[in-house]
Image: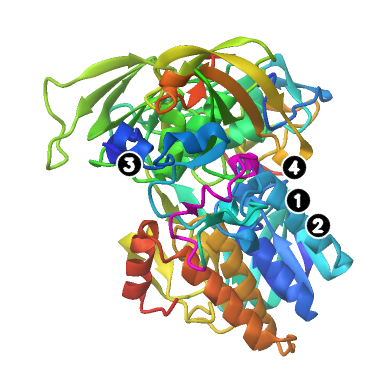
Amino acid sequence: MRVNQHPILSFDTKEEITFTFNGKPMKGMMGDTIASALHANGVKKLSESIHLKRPRGFYCAIGNCASCNMIVDGKPNVRTCITPLKEGMRVEFQHGKGHVYET
Amino acid sequence: MERGMYMRHKEAVIIGAGPAGLKAAKSLCEAGASVTIIDRNKDLGGQLTKQTHKFFGSEKQYASVRGIEILKILLNDLLEYGTQCEILNETSVVGLYHDKVIACVKDDKFFKIKAESIIIATGASEKSIPFENNDLPGIYAAGAVQTLMNQYGVKPGDKVLMVGSGNIGLIVSYQLMQAGVEVVKLVEAAPSISGYLVHASKIQRLGVDILTQTSIKRAIGKEQVEKVELWNLDETWQGMEGSEQTLEVDTVCISVGLAPLTELLMQVGAEVMYVRELGGNVPKIDHRYQTTVKGVYACGDVCGIEEASSAMVEGALSGIHAAFDLGYTIDDEKRKVKALKEELKFLRSGPHAAKIRAGYNKLGVMI
Amino acid sequence: MIEKTGIPPREMVKKEFPKDERVLINPKAIIECYKEIPCNPCETSCPFDAIHVGEDINKRPVIDFDKCTGCGICVFNCPGLAISVMQLKEDKALLKIPYEFIPRPQKDALVNVVNRSGEVITVGLVKRVQEGKKQKQTALLHIEIDRDFIYDAITIEVPHGQ
């Protein structure tokens, strides 16, 4: 699902980043957001609607619509479309609204 | 979340580092003001970060240069000013108060900035339209798909239906093909194409059929889009039973317009007005881009949906006015303002800008 | 028609060509900018002052075929990819088009040439693939076609899902 060659842009082979999605190891690229890395791994369902539990993917990709909110390193409601992917991140599917946490 | 220890004091703060915000920053720096640019993204540039097409306009708005290259020019312009221009990226503004206090969150830390002057250049967000299953994964805003493939190098899917024939819909269709993705059809509910015809011709000759008076009836799929059903619309824009056709696609791009992101303007107490032609709620600005709150300015798409070329000119203008109000003298101010206004006049004088002109007329702003 | 599909009818296309076909013995730019948009790089990029838009950049460009040399500079400067160059060469014609896909076709390759609706109408021969820094990643393809297709040929087929 990665763009391999492009007439205008160059996506040089970048450093790989390892992260987990629901405990499953996955690989992303340096420069990815969490959502772009998941999408490249074929994960399109990022959250679910709060009441009817309908599957949701990202929508706006500018950190505005909340459709891509997930639990990252234990923290709920992370806007995965604008949050850069980092080595070792634990990304989890979020059920419901998320809960208050302490750092 | 940790709390910052103190309130930072800043001279001019720009919220949003897109084409308008970056140009405003340059005007302010040029005048001698110290500037802080806040953006919630890691990379500055707003929509320019993924605009691989060459821009329209004249040389003054970098016509014929690709958006991603224009961004390099704008950032380079700011580098010249060194620490005079502070950049707070990956920073979200979570509150904006009447006394020009800006509440921010960066790296999970909360802090406040007290600004003398604020320029709001938050841009806009893409709208959606109602149809059955319009929330399925695989249904994305067209600009969001442009970000995914052009900024992060990830394809949205293999087969795409594009909904909407505005410039974004037409341009993103072409760019999907450049990324090696098939665009199966483009549908438009209106009786004619709404974007530039040159963009439409460009994708039509590459085999993408444009169907006007056609819309998406529903998406089909369990966990993600597998198929879509299209139908024709009659003169009253109602779907016609019996005209349905099914397409196998794994992605639907929605390009049906944008809405200005005015939440911060409302928080700060600036008056906004609903102007359909400008995309929704827009701030009541005066001819100097000042909102009804003294010292708070707005420019770019947050004032009304237009092309990035106009956003850049508006940004440059609001930066000059903000600098003047801060007490700076600007070399050749009158001539600069006049020249920039002239640029805007031409950008907004064609048939495609009729809506913009009508919108500003409603708002009661001389443009 | 064009407002609904983006396809200009043949009569509309023909109006952008020189009235006298013999003018095309030398290469000439064919500008298909059918609706007013705020844009003028065709005018500012032309080294021969052959294209006029004027102060109001919304006006449609007007070309002076006496001044146009068919150099192709406007072709890769037009943000709308709305300009091509046509030249007659006996029973053949040489078409220069902007091209922004990869892989680029190779010189001497046979390519499917399409019309403005995207239908394959003939096979063309790639005579040259012109690329340069000034072209800003828009290649200029020189395609030889049969003279019969001068009002129909507009670009080459791009394979789906490269």
Whether labels 3 and 4 belong to a single chain: the reply is no
Query: Is the residue B275 above or below the residue B10 in the image?
Result: above
Is residue C59 magenta-colored?
A: yes
Q: Looking at the magenta stretch, what is its main secondary structure?
A: loop
The one of C67 and B28 positioned closer to us in this rendering = C67
Question: Label 4: chain?
Answer: C
Q: Is residue B325 left or right of residue A99?
A: right
Q: Which one is earlier in the sequence, the residue at label 3 or at label 2?
A: 2
Q: Are marks 3 and 4 in contact (CB under 8 Å)?
A: no
Disc 2 residue type? Asn
Q: Chain of mark 3?
A: B
- Which amino acid does the dot numbered 4 rest on? Lys
First along the sequence among labels 1 and 3: 1
Identified by mark 3, the residue type is Ile
User: How many dots with numbers?
Assistant: 4
Mark 2 sits on what residue?
A: B76
- Asked which secondary structure carries label 1, the reply is helix
* Circle 1 chain: B
Residue range (magenta): C55-76
| Above or below C102: residue B71 | below
The span from disc 3 to disc 4 (Cα, nearest Å) is 32 Å
Measured Cα–Cα span from mark 3 to mark 2: 37 Å
For disc 1, the marked residue is: B72
Mark 3 or 2: in front is 3
Q: For mark 4, what is the residue?
A: C134
Q: Residue B87: which quarter of the image?
A: bottom right
Image quarter where the C terminus of chain B lies is bottom left
Residue at position x 42%, y 14% in the image:
C120
The residue sitting at 69% across, 22% down in the picture is: C128
Frontmost of labels 2 and 4 is: 4
> On screen, B221 above or below B139?
above
